[in-house]
Every structure is written in structure tokens, then in C-alpha cells.
Image (cartoon, rainbow, N blue to C red):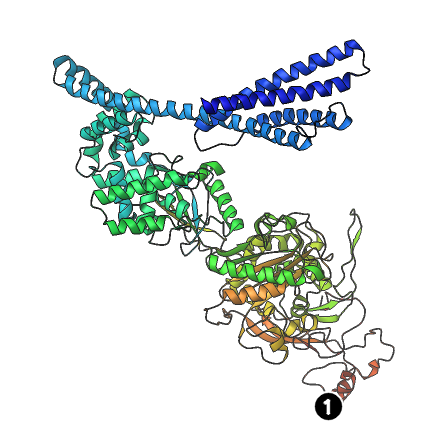
Amino acid sequence: MLRGGIYMSTKHRKREDAAKIRSNSAASSEKGKPQAEIQHARTQQDAQDGQAAHDKENGTKDRNAVTSSPSRAPTLPKTQEIRSTQHTSSTRDKLVGQAANGSIQLHKDRVDPETLRIQYWRQRRKVFLRHISRKYMRQARQDSQRTMRRFWVVLGSVVAALLVIFLSVSGTGAYLTYQFYSDTQSKYVPRVVNLRDLLPRDNLKVYDSKGVIIGQLTDQGMHTAVQLQDVSQDLQNATVAIEDKNFWTNPGIDIPRIIQAAISDLSHGRVVEGGSTITQQLIKRLVVGNQTSLIRKLEEVMLTPSVNSQYTKRDILEMYLNSIFYGEQAYGVDAAATVFFGLQDKPGKPASSQLDLAQAAMLAGLPQSPYSYDPRIYPEAAQARFEQVLSAMYTQGYITNAQRLDALKEGQSSHFFKRPDLTNRAPHFFNFVLRQLEQEYHLKRNQLSRSDMQVYTTLDIGLQDKILQIARNHIDQIRDTNHVTNAAEVLIDFHTGAIRSLLGSIDYNDESIDGQFDVATQAYRQPGSSYKPFVYVTAFKEGSSPAQAIDDASLTINLPGSNPPTFTPHNYDMKYHGHMTLRCALQNSLNIPAVKVLQHAGIAASMQTAHDMGVSSYEGTPGYSLVLGGLGVRLIDETSAYGTFANGGVHVPYYAIQKIVFANTHNTIEHAANPGKRAISKQLAYMMTSVLSDNDSRLPEFFDCNVLQLYSNSQQECRLGDRGTVRPSAAKTGTTTDFRDNWTLGYTTDYVLGVWAGNDDNTPMSNVTGVDGAGPLWHDAMLEAEQGHPIRNFTNPGGLERATVTYADGVTTTDWFMPGTEPKFTPNLQPTPNGTDDQDTSLLPDLLDVNSTSSQQAQFQQFNAKVPGPYCPSSYSFAFPPPGGSSSGSDGWW
């Protein structure tokens, strides 16, 4: 009473002081004002005083309510907080404003602006605490209602179980019990018989060729079915100890435990202990559903004997651990081991088998209420449940007290819980596989999520990670100087078609380079000169050979009805290089000879060859520019087509999925080995390989120590004369005329590798050719892929003839020919003007053969001194000066 009296007297004094201040302020402000205005102001002030007194009383009540509220406090709803803040702020602003302009005179000893500021913040605190209290009271009521519902269901279950026992011994009761039992059996027994089919399906997982997981679909949760033998024994014991301590001996229903649970719940006034056995929980989850009703509970009881007769205790526990929900999208114990402790499935060692005692005890406590015991949301509740599980294990003899204490200590460690590493290690390849599954099985992406598929692929993720780093390092070196931001690559075992590595970009998560777009499998980019081998091999098929003489000179092709009406190709260096062989022209990527080869081979025939070899689709209109890379093709297709050269002319389609295992049924779908289809003869394939692997012939354009040669030492060491070990390889580059695309494709005796470099937005690079952009990446990646493989040279399949031929234009070369295609020329050495003013053609002999006279030989030697040097000295030479003019074709050279 004394404290109350003091409080009341103090409160009244404060009110009196405030009234005096208002009276003095009002008297001062009313001077010189009309009476009506003064009366109106007093009325408003009285209303404000009444509202302030009302708010103060409410504030006192709110403090009392907050004091009695739970200690946990949720955040204030934003709309209410803003509304309250705005109201308080406006009041504060009004008071401060009035004090500032003199309409309220503050007493120096009683009220000042600082006092107003303190009152303002006190008022905000009152509002905040009031809303917190209200929200917690609502939450407490909801929790209480849920608890009471569960409580009455448990109590009703006990009464119903006792009633069933009682009625079973009487005639009418026995009949009713039998009728209910019969109805339940007929309704649910088919589901009981096929209980394993009702288990949650595994989420789709994709593994590499060595069983390393590279990605999974988790949009509908995570689940991995495991056998009981692959579950930690500690977890098995912990689950039985806390969920159903008599599991191994009870018949599926534990009446004493139900009664004990009911008594415990009654004594606490809430549900603190469940009475359902593990068998009943399994039936609830998989058969009758989890609806809170007495009928559902009785159905559990009626179905328990059927489950016990169909399955062993180990079967029941295994299905329970595979079906129960642990929270945070983890369905089943294996997924829970990953989600909460970061454990990963390994070949022969699932995550569930790696759980220790502390981890097992924590997980075993979660199924009763996965959300309420979530250690990341409610750590204190989770810790209490964790200790409860360990105590149960200790009491029931599963562990010693020392083990319990050690587990408690481990559970309190800051590093006890670990986030799982769910990073998709090969996102472009992963999506490529999903697209194939969608097409093959006619499923949508959300249907694949829980399709039960374990997809084992051809990818070597360890190798791909190394290639990815090589690509990133190379692009970093040329990004700023050459404006190159991205790269893609495909590595295929051409013998089988297995994709070993596939990068759609150098960074899937980099939006600045459009990293999520898969350039390797989805982009149609112009391949530049890398398309030329398909045209050249078509010409070989029609009877020519790498030795064929050709003139690199100005060329214009009329195209009636086209716009423009003519087509005039140019070489990369804008020069002409005279007479040479096809080998020299292809290896130095000269455009004019390539167009001439296309004229002889034919556009349609060349397109068909490329299609048969693996370039199954393209964008654009085929024309003479196709040999220069004028069509858009996919990197994966052209890489596969180059593999046809490497595989002796047999095209084996690429594939990514080695096998699919359905987790529940263990049914397996294996990739059927594909022998492939012959696209070109093995002799033609070898002729092309002999050209693309001829490093000496490409020296005029690419110089020595170029990256198309697989020397093991660095390029600098190579230039100093130390190449190291050189692995035979065949390769070709490609660059579009506007520098928008860089390609390098090539193969060894083991793999075919295709690389693209450029910009996804199609902006041009700065002076980057294939040998500078994509070439170094190809070189380093191929050497990395070949680590551990023996060095083998390309094998001549036989069936070819090697001969030395002199063409009518003077080109002399030794090369491979298909049988019967070796040309036979009798050189016509009649003087032919070649545009050289000082050339003396009077010394030209009539014939050059073994029967020439010594005088004729002497004359020819004098004339030979004026023969030009060949563009590719290692590939051919001139027997005599080539003719001038533009005549060709009928003379045996193109």
C-alpha cells in the first residue's frame, strides 16, 4: 500500500505539474486573441489531455501484459509498426513545433525539448511491446489448440483401444470389431502388400563416370533410398530408443506404452509422449494418411498385424527410416545426413552410414516435430531433444555414460552442423543430360525431380574441372587486350561417342558473359575454316588427293539472280600465293583454293559428307561461302564429325548417359554400345589425317612451335629447341572474317576435342585468330586429357598408293592416292607467258623426260634457275616454272 500510495502521489504530482504548464502556456498564448478562438483552443487542449491520460493508463497495462508474456518475442508486424510510428511521430512533431514557434512556453525547471524526446521514445517502446505481446498471445493460443487436439486424439486412442478389447469379448462387439477390421483390410491390404512401392521416390541425381555426384534436382526435396545395412547402427538404436523402445519385441502395437503415454500426457496437460509404434507410424505415413482422427488411429491398429505378417522388423525399420521426414527438405535418413551434417554419398559408402553417435542422436529426435526441433531455427529445443535421445539410449543400455557425455560435448561444438555442398559441378552438362531425359522419356522437368532416377554419365568431372581452369586462365590472359570473354569446349572419346567433358561457358554464374547459355550444345556459330576438311575430303572421294595441284589466284564466281551477283573470296592475308597442292592450301587455311575445291566437289555433295560425318544440323543457306564457315553449326556436332576422321571414317554418335538405375526397383537401363555407321572410307579418313597432322606444311602461316602441335614442353622451350615429347595430333583452326568466332578442332588416337572462343553477345574480338584464341586452350586441354595415355601414331589402314607426281603446272609432289587415281601427265613445256618481262622462254625444251638429250637437260637447268620458290617447301616443289594466266582444269591443275 505504501508503495502504491507513493506511486499514486507521484503520478498526481506529475499531472498537476503538467496542468500548470499547460495553464501558463495557455494564458500566455490567449493574450490578444478573440474569445471564440480562445475557447476553441481550450476545447482542443482538453481533448488532448484526455487522450494522453487514456494512453498512459493503457501503457501501464501494456507493461504488465508484457511482463507476464513469454520470453520469446517475434518481430512487430510492419504495417502496425509503421502506423504506430507515424502517429507517435506526428504527435512529437506537433509538440516540438509548438515549442519552437512559441505557442507553448516551456517551464525551465519542468519540461524542455529533451523531456519531450524521452517521452517520444518511451511512447514508441510502449507501442512496440504492446504489439509483441499481442502476437505472442495469439501464437500461444494456436499452439495450445494444436496441443489439445493431439492430446485428445491420444486419449481417445487409448479409450478406443480398450473399447476394442472389451467389445471383442462380447458377441455384438465382436461382430462390430470384425466388420470394421474386414472393411479396413479390404480397403488397404493391397497397399500393405506393395508397401515398398509407396516409399518416397528418390530425387533425380546425376553422377559422373566414376560415381561422383555432379548435380541433383532438389526442388521437391531430397531423398535417397538406402538399405538398413547402410544406416549407421547408432542411428538405428537412437531411433528405436526414442520412438519405440519395445520395437524389436512388440507385435506392432504397444498397449502398455499407449496407456503410459496417456497418463504422462494427462499429468502434464499436453502431449509429451507419443504412443504410436514405429510400425504404426509407417502405416500412417504410407497407407492411411496422417489425418488427426479416431478412425484413422483405429485403422492403424487394424492394419498392424498385416504389416507384421508381410515384413520383418528389419524391413519395417528400413522402410520407416527411408520414408520419415526430418525437416529442411530432407526425406529419409540419408538425405538428412547430407542436409544437416554435409555428409556426401560416396561409392559404397552412403552418407547414412557415416553418422556418428552425436549426429545419429540429433537426427533421431527430429521426426517427432521436424520444424519445432529444427536446430537451425530453434537450437535450444533441438538441444533439449538431443539430450533426451541420448538419455533414452543410455537408460536402455545402448551406450555408456561416457559415450553420452562425449556425444553431448560434440553436439555443443560450433562446427557440429554443416551445410551441404549442393553445388552443381557441371551445370551445362547437367542440363544437357536433363534435356535428353525429357526427350527420351517424354517427361517434364518437375516430373524428373522425383523420378527415382540415378543417372550415371560419361563425364569425367575431375578432368573437366582441370580443363575449366585452363580455359579461365587463358581467357583472363586475352580478355582485355583482345576483347575475348568466353570459351566453350567438348571432349569426346570418338571410339564410343562418350562425352568426357563439356563446358558451355567458362562461368555458369557470370551474367556479364551470359554464362548460363550453353554455347557447346545450343549455339549455332560460324566455324570459319574449320569446316574446310569436309569439303576437301569430298573432293578426295571424287578422285583427287592431297597432291592435287591448284592455283591460289584471283577468283570471281558469277551468281545469276543473287545479290550481289558475284562472289569473290579473299585470303586472310589478302595475298595470292600461286601454284601449290591441296595439302599446302588446307594446312595454311587459304580461302581461294578452298572455294575452287568446293567448285569441283559440289555444294550438295559436300553438305552430305558433313551430315554423314556428324554435322546433323545447321543454320543459314548453303553456298560457296560454306567452305569458309558461312553456315552456323554447333560445336558438339562439328567435334563429333572430326571424330569420324579419327575413327577411320566411322561415325559413332556422341552420348552422355551411360546407365540409369531406378532406386526403388533397382531396374537398370544401360547404354547400348553403338558400332557407328561408316561415313567415308578408312582410306579417305587417313588421307585427311595425314594432311591435318602435317605440321611442316602449315609452317608458312602458323610458324614453328604453333599450338596445334602437341609438344610437352612450353612454347618458349620449344622455340629454344626443346620440344619435349611430341604426341601425334591432327588439328584445324577456324576464324570468321569479322573475328566474331574462334575455333580449333583436332584429335589424337584417343580423343577428339573442339574449342570455341569469342563473345556470347556476338561482338567482334580484336585481331584474334584460331591459333591465338581457341588454339592454346585446345593444346593445353588435350595434353591434360592425354595424361597417362600411351603415345601412339596414326595407323595407315592400307589400300593407298604413294607416288610422286609432276602436274602440268610444274608442281611436283609425293603423296597418297586412292588406287588408280594417280594422274599421268606428259608435261607440255611449250613457252607460256607468265607475266614476267625478263623471262627467257627460248631455253624451254620441247619435252622433259628420261629420253631428253644432254643438250636439252642443260637448257632446262638454265631455265630452272628462274623457277619460283614453293609456298610450302616441305609439301611440293616445281619441276619447271608454273604457267601464267588463269587457265586450269583441262591442264590437270585447278
265 shown above or below 844: above
Image quarter (top left, top right, bottom left or bottom right) of the N terminus: top left
Location of residue 440 in the rendering, given as x and y in whole percent from the top left corner:
46, 42
Image quarter of residue 321: top left
Residue at the spot of label 1: 854
Residue at x 69% of width, y 74% of height = 872
Location of residue 383 in the rendering, given as x and y in whole percent from the top left corner:
36, 42
Residue at x 70% of width, y 60% of height = 480
Q: Tell me if residue 331 can be seen.
A: no
Residues 154 and 610: in front is 154
Residue 537 shown left or right of residue 331 in the figure = right
Tag 1's secondary structure? helix
Residues 398 and 342: in front is 398
Image quarter of residue 158: top left
Residue 380 shown left or right of residue 685 in the figure = left
145 shown above or below 378: above
Label 1 is placed on what type of residue?
Answer: Ser
